[in-house]
């Protein structure tokens, strides 16, 4: 098993060399079929990693590897996820500014992970833990959401009776104030 920051993939005889940031002298190998399947499934992660959005992002790869020959490791299967510069998993570039604002403000928060949920839009993009007794959901609406995702987000907000919402194509609104805890 390999877990590292993805650096690059380059064509080589027989497939691809997959370079990981913390393994500069030992690329993983992948057959052309394997890497092209992975690159297609995680195209959005690879595109977001290479996009110019003014913030550092990381593509983290988790790969099941096997030794086909001595000192040669081949990827059997892999998954990629997008993370902020602080290694916080994000569902897309639209969440980066919110995560950065929370980190910069020193806020206590949880970033829910959707894993294999059918629609990530139904989840809060972050939960503030320092605003009172219950976590406060923070929602981000991307201008690139599908109509289905927009409806799922709207249904979640209706069920909660509203909440903190930011449309990512506008300036980020003020975060709810933190409650001072008494010792």
Image: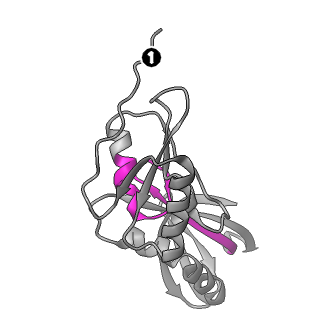
Kindly identify the residue that appears in the image at 59 percent across and 54 percent down.
113
Above or below 63: residue 159: above
Element under disc 1: loop
Residue furthest out toward the top = 183
Q: Which residues are magenta?
A: 75-100
Q: From the viewer's side, name the closer residue of 123 and 71.
A: 123
Above or below 38: residue 55: above
Kindly identify the residue that appears in the image at 48 percent across and 70 percent down.
45
Q: On the rendered structure, is 12 left or right of 92? A: right
The quadrant of the picture occupied by the N terminus is: bottom right
Q: From the viewer's side, name the closer residue of 39 and 159.
A: 159
Percent coordinates x, y for residue 28 in the rendering: 60, 72
Q: On the rendered structure, is 39 left or right of 180? A: right
Percent coordinates x, y for residue 92 in the rendering: 45, 64
Decide whether residue 162 is among the magenta residues. Answer: no
Percent coordinates x, y for residue 156 in the rendering: 55, 56
Which residue is denoted by mark 1 in the rendering? 181
Decide whether residue 93 is among the magenta residues. Answer: yes
Color theme of the render: one colour
Kindly identify the residue that appears in the image at 50 percent across and 33 percent down.
129
Percent coordinates x, y for residue 169 in the rendering: 29, 65
Can residue 60 be seen here? The reply is no
Kindly identify the residue that appears in the image at 46 percent across and 49 percent down.
162
Can residue 45 be seen here? The reply is yes
Above or below 86: residue 54: below
Q: From the viewer's side, name the closer residue of 41 and 77.
A: 41
- Snapshot quadrant of residue 142: bottom left
- Snapshot quadrant of residue 152: bottom right
Q: On the rendered structure, is 126 left or right of 71? A: left
């Amino acid at each position: 098993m390999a877990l590292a920051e993805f650096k690059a993939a380059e064509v080589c005889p027989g497939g691809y060399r997959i370079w990981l940031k913390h393994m500069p002298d030992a690329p993983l190998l992948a057959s052309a079929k394997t890497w092209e399947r992975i690159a297609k499934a995680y195209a959005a992660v690879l595109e977001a990693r290479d996009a110019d959005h003014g913030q550092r992002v990381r593509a983290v790869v988790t790969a099941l590897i096997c030794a086909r020959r001595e000192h040669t490791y081949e990827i059997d299967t892999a998954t990629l996820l997008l993370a902020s510069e602080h290694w916080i998993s994000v569902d897309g570039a639209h969440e980066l500014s919110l995560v950065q604002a929370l980190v910069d403000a020193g806020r206590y928060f949880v970033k829910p992970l959707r894993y294999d949920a059918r629609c990530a839009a139904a989840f809060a993009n972050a939960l503030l833990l320092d605003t009172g007794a219950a976590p406060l959901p923070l929602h981000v609406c991307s201008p690139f959401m599908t109509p289905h995702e927009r409806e799922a987000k709207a249904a979640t907000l209706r069920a909660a009776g509203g909440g903190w919402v930011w449309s990512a194509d506008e300036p980020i609104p003020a975060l709810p104030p933190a409650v001072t805890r008494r010792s």
